[in-house]
Every structure is written in structure tokens, then in C-alpha cells.
Image (cartoon, rainbow, N blue to C red):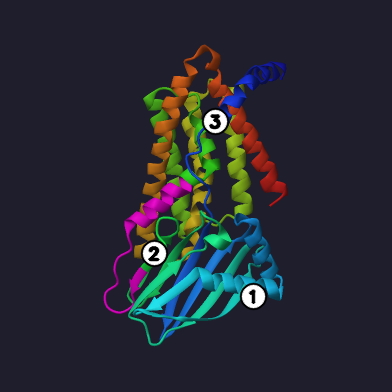
Amino acid sequence: MRSLLRRVRRLLPALPLLAVWPALAHVSSTGLATLSADGERLTYTLNVVAQEMPEMARQMLGGAVDGNQPMAQALAEAARQALSIEADGAPCRPGRMRIQGSQAGDGKVRLELILTCRAAPRRVTIREDWRALFGEHYQSILSVRTAQGSQEHVLGEGQRAASVEFAGEAAPSGWSDFIRLGMEHILGGIDHLLFLVALLANARRFWTVATIVTAFTLAHSITLSLAVQGAVAVPSHIVEPLIAASIVWVAAENLIWPGTAWRRWLVSFIFGLVHGLGFAGALAELNLDSAALVKALVGFNVGVELGQVAFIAVFLPLLAWASRAPALRRLPQAASLAVAVMGAFWLVQRVFFE
């Protein structure tokens, strides 16, 4: 224990260097939306997690769920400002909004808005801009249900509108939406990135890096697929603390047992199973049909891997180059210590305050 404390004290002067570590991506909040038609009537639903939203939106959502009428009216007005739908070039008229909280205690809120069009739509254009309420980096995964099947789109910073044919042959959903979603999810998930930092902090050989990353990829692909298909269901209040615990464990290994690189692939696989359950939150509740589900899983996984490779391609060479300087030779250990502290903070936060 004393040797560990001495090692930690020697690393403390290097910690300020991590403050200039560039942020590769922002953290986005994601809502799950559906749109369906019944004659000239459209039903739009949006599911969001209140805790992920800015303070103003969190208060408004919580107040509306608890029956505060001014809050509910303000939320309904904000939704009408954020959402517009046209059918065959003519705007559909929004009606009353229904606001419902989850009974599972997970902070999810469901908004349901009924819109009336002039006639049964043949082509619908959906425009979303929730920035005023949900923040600059909010995005929706929108599933539009038609008689020909479903189409999925990601609406957010890069794309605010989508058009869908309700009559005739449905256009296929773009792979690029799910690939982009996967990339944003991994690059915007600082906990997943810090887990990779801890996993690879002491890795230098290509084969070592390849086996660790392959094990992590295989594991999270397994649990992601099972969770999205409904074969595995683990509540987020269990998954999120486990992700934080995995960060602490791997970072602590780097400090206490730094010579364990030969079995790091096994640790990577075991904890990769947990991280896959965390990834699944972005897709599991869409209830996609089989064809759309395959496309979503493949595209999302490809996006996660592309984002992961991009991060590693920047992080590892930078770490190796910086560690050559005599004053920074302990930078991998300093990085591991910082990651362990952050993981411990998340663990306490997710166990006791969420």
C-alpha cells in the first residue's frame, strides 16, 4: 500500500498535463421518436431521458409529468415550435399533447402529439429543431412507420429534416444515418473513451493493441445485438455503474499490476460485454422490423468501430510520442490515475445519486 501511495505522489505533478487533452467530441442527448399515420391523422411520439437534458428542460419535463399545468403548457408550446410536419406540401395542424412519465423510475418521459392533415398523406416531410429546449447537441432517432415498412433517420446537428413516402414503394433507410449515430455514440461517450484509454495506456505493440481492440469489439457486438433484439434486458441503473466500475478496475490494474498486458484481452472482452449493453440504449426501444434491425445493428456497429479506430489512431501515437520526453515518461501512469479518479467519481454518482 505504501509503495502505491509513493507511486501516486510521484505521478501527481504530471496530472495538469492532462487538462489540455483535447476533447474529441461533445456528449449528445438522444431521443427516440416515431411517426405513424391513420388516414389524415398523424401520431408523433418522442421518448427522452429527463436527466440527460439541460436544467431548464429537466425542470419542465419533471413539472409536466407531476401535473404542473403551466409547465405542461410551456412544454407543449416548445414542442410545437420545435416540430413541424407537412403532408404533400401542406402543413399538418398540431393538436393537444399528451405527456407521460415512466413507471420504472428511469426518468424517461414520453411526449405524444396528434396532428391533423388535410388528407391522408402520400409524402410527409418532418422538421425537428429542439435546440431551444434540449440543447445544441440533441438528436432524435426517428422511425417513420408506413404500410411498406419503417424508415429510420437521425435528425440533429447535421440534418434537421427528412421526407418519407407514405404511398408507393418506401425508400430504404440510409446506412449512413446509423453509421453516423454509432460514431457519435462512441466519440461522444467519454466513459467509453476513457475505458479505451485505460485499456491501451501501456500497449505499444501492434499485436497487443489489435487483440485488445478485437476482444472489446467482439464482446460489445454480442451484447448490443442481444439487447436490441430483446434477448437480454439489464436496467440502465445496473449497466451504468458497471461501466464506471470497469473504468476503475482497468485503470487501477495499470497502476498496481502494470505487467498484466498478456491477459488484458480477457479483461477487455469481459467488460466489453458490459459496454455493449450501454451502447444498446440508443437502439433498443425503437422496435424495428427485422430488415431495419439488421441495417441498424450493422450500421451502428460499423460507426462505433470507425469512431473507435479514429480515437485510437490519435491517442496512441500521441501518448507514445509524449512519453519519450524524460519529464513525461510516467504519462501513461498519470493518465491511468486520472482515469481511475474519474471512473470512481462516476461510480459514486451513478450508484448514489441517479
Residue 152: which disc? 2
Quarter of the image where the N terminus is located: top right
Q: Residue 77, located in which quarter of the rendered image?
A: bottom right
Residue 127: which disc? none
Of the image marks 3 and 2, the number of the one nearer the N terminus: 3
Q: Is residue 129 visible?
A: yes
- The 10 Å Cα crowd at callout 3, few under 14, some 14 to 19, many 20 or more, is few
Of the image marks 1 and 2, the number of the one nearer the N terminus: 1
**Image height check: is 207 above or below 98?**
above
Could you tell me how far apart the alpha carbons at marks 1 and 3 are, in whole angstroms? 44 Å
Residue indicated by mark 1: 73
Q: Residue 248, located in which quarter of the rendered image?
A: top right
Magenta highlight on residue 182:
yes
> In the rendering, at what x and y percent does residue 327 appear?
55, 14
Q: Give the range drawn in magenta.
A: 163-186
**Image height check: is 302 above or below 319?**
below
> In the rendering, at what x and y percent does residue 250 appear?
57, 32
- Please give the name of the residue rendered at 42% of the width and 53% of the height, measured from the top-left corner: 181
Residue closer to the observer: 276 or 188: 188
Residue indicated by mark 3: 20
Residues tagged 1 and 3 counted as in contact (Cβ below 8 A):
no
User: In what element is the residue under mark 1?
Assistant: helix
Q: Can residue 253 be seen in this view?
A: no
Q: Which amino acid does label 1 sit on?
A: Gln
**Image height check: is 115 above or below 302?**
below
